[in-house]
Image (spheres, grey):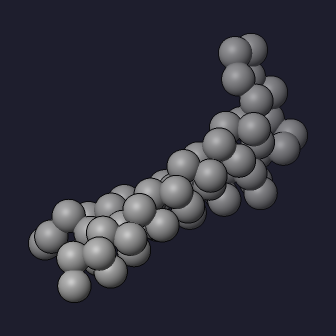
Amino acid sequence: MNSSSKALTGGGITFVIGLVLWQFTGDIETPVVTLTKLGVVLMALGALEVVYGLYKGVARK
């Protein structure tokens, strides 16, 4: 498995975890961090990693 496919897979998984947190944890209260905001941050990081993986895949060819 090359590094571009690893970045795509990892970014996709991170994005999906963030999406689940954002959608389904609105009524859960934690003392340190808001889970919906954490979900948005994870979605942004996952999307950036996917874009980076796509860039690495295209730049390599």
Q: Residue at x 74, y 14 (%)?
A: 31
60 w.r.t. 22: above or below: below
Asked if residue 6 lies left or right of residue 13, the reply is left
Looking at the image, the residue that sits furthest to the top is 31
34 w.r.t. 32: above or below: below
How many numbered marks are there? 0
Asked if residue 30 lies left or right of residue 50, the reply is right
Residue 43 figure quarter: bottom right
46 or 26, nearer to the observer: 46
Q: Residue at x 45, y 66 (%)?
A: 50
Looking at the image, the residue that sits furthest to the right is 27
Q: Residue at x 62, y 52 (%)?
A: 44
* Quadrant housing the C terminus: bottom left
Q: Residue at x 66, y 59 (%)?
A: 19
Residue 9 point in image, percent of width and height? 35, 68
Looking at the image, the residue that sits furthest to the left is 1
* Quadrant housing the N terminus: bottom left
Residue 35 figure quarter: top right
20 or 15, nearer to the observer: 15
Residue 25 in view of the camera: yes
51 or 61, nearer to the observer: 61
Asked if residue 45 lies left or right of residue 59, the reply is right
Residue 23 point in image, percent of width and height? 77, 57
Residue 3 point in image, percent of width and height? 20, 64
Residue 8 in view of the camera: no
